[in-house]
Image: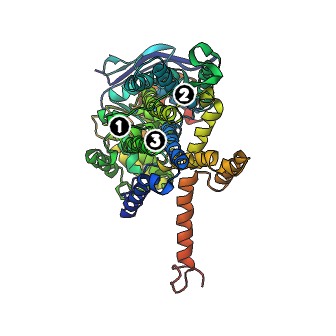
Amino acid sequence: MTALSVSGLTKSFGGLRVTNGVDLTVEPGERRLIIGPNGAGKTTLFNLITGELAPDTGTIALFGRDITRTACRRRAHLGMARTYQIITLFPRDTILRNVVLALLGLSGLRWNPLIGLDRQRHLATRAGEALARVGLSHIADRPLAETSYGERRRVEIAMAMAQNPKVLLLDEPFAGLSIDERRDVRQLLAAIPRDVTVVMIEHNMDVALDLADRITLLHFGEVIVEGTRAEVVADPRSREVYLGE
Amino acid sequence: MKVQLTRRVPARHAAFGFALFGLTTVPLWVGNSYYIDVASQILLFAVFALALNVLVGYGGLVSLGHAGLFAVSGYTAGLMLQAGFGHAAAGVGAVSITLLTSAAFAVLALRATGIGFLMITLALGQILWGIAYRWADLTNGDNGISISTRPAPFGISLAGAPSFYYATLVVFLLALATMAAFVRSPFGASLCGTRDQARRMTALGYNVWLIRFLAFLFSGLWCSIAGLLYLYNKQFISPQVSALQASAEVLLMVISGGTATLLGPIAGAAIVVVMKYVVSAYVVRWNLVLGVIFVAIISFMPEGLVPGSVRIWGFTRRRWRAIRPGRKPPPGAPP
């Protein structure tokens, strides 16, 4: 069974067709890289897959289950997690609290108006473990507003991973990072266990290429090339569209 | 989120105990029943402001129609009492009708956030004001509704100012305790999350709309209780209570005191009520004084009186420590 299967997906904003008949099949445990020039519709594709946007036509299935009309929040409960290209965190809270909110999102406790959230030690413990995996334990209690950009990127990943997703969608996880930070995040992503399927958008070829099993190249909302790393790199169309020369 | 995450220090317990002692002895040291009544009004408007703060402070949803909900409660109870129902039935009726109205408000207003939410709540509040003012067959129009008695829970008559004050104090403390639990709870954290990052909350699996809807009902519940207290306090209710000015006034209480804090709305309610009922006896243009106070608060403490005072107090203390003679300057400081 495929982990994620997208077929005939179309989305238009006014007269602009941003996603044009996209088909995508990702096997369980696969690392899929989605590349394409600016405006190719990569993030829109993510927003369609996670349900933040509704497609005009086409279907999306998660482990064989049709989720095309499933609400975005339900998809999180079905095992889909994502990070954002533009960091989308809770600036007033501590790093730990950000991750606790991620855990709470999938817990029935989130409706409880009576108990103290700070007393839910099991949430704090699990959040602490998620932060340890991304190497942020030492600043867990720091307000998010006082953290660096690279640390926030890692908080994004910790939040997504804390939800134990089956399918993880990473939207440019290396964007805006220094060379050192990139290496750290790369190690982090390489350590994600193979029971998690990863779909990643990334511009930064030198770090992203060797993480990927297969690569999909988008251009003007369409899939131009799809194949293994070597196939896509060797394909003249991808050179023409993206890799230059 | 501004919910206190630090462990409460004993000083805070002491301050709370001191405040509680002060509040419970108000009738003893105030004496004059007019001023006891002013104290009751501060507390009941504090409940109202705390209710609005759930949406404004923790939900990031600025409502300008809450006086409508407050008035629905007062009018429902007033009309039921006039029709011959008992106090218990009137109370239950008022809360139920207000909750239904809140639900209707929420369904319509939560189609938007920000300015859109504000404009829809304003319009809905004006509709209720219109009903109170113009539907004279039901609401007695501009003449308002009077009731002859206050209730006597557990056989204790609330007819006098001190006994009514204590009843209001009990309700106020209950409201405060409920709010304190609410803001520390997972649901409170969820509401703050929808304020700060609604999109992320959805992607994390939260039902943002339902969280806001339930918060609106919670806010409506306490508005309704405040409205009931108002009716029984004045034994009279008129369309002015539901007017836009009343909505703006309670919103100013929340903003001037400090949104998303527990003490802020209480401080704001105290300022407005004291201006209205105490300073107005000495200063004819008390509205001007109130305006100057609000301008001063917004200029010097844009975050509100309570958080602003905390900030300035901390700053002054650090400064004082730094300049106090006989202390070593911090390392790296110029000689």
- Image coordinates of residue B309 in percent, x first then y, are 55, 59
Q: Secondary structure at mark 1?
A: loop
Around disc 1, counting alpha carbons within 10 Å, would you say few (fewer than 14), some (14 to 19), or many (20 or more)? many
Frontmost residue, A50 versus B321: B321
- Image coordinates of residue A79 in percent, x first then y, are 32, 29
Residue B71: numbered disc: 2
Q: Secondary structure at mark 3?
A: loop
Frontmost residue, A195 versus B154: B154
| Callouts 1 and 3 in the same chain | no
Residue A113: numbered disc: 1
Q: Is residue B219 left or right of residue A80?
A: right
Q: Are marks 2 and 3 in contact (CB under 8 Å)?
A: no
The Cα atoms of the two marked residues, 1 and 3, are separated by 36 Å
Amino acid marked by disc 2: Ala
| Callout 3: chain | B
Q: Are marks 2 and 1 in contact (CB under 8 Å)?
A: no
Any part of residue A41 in sight: no
Q: How many discs appear?
A: 3
Q: Give the label, 2 or 1, closer to the camera.
A: 2
Frontmost residue, B308 versus B144: B144
Q: Quarter holding the N terminus of chain A? A: top left
The Cα atoms of the two marked residues, 2 and 1, are separated by 27 Å
Amino acid marked by disc 1: Pro
The residue under label 3 is: B160
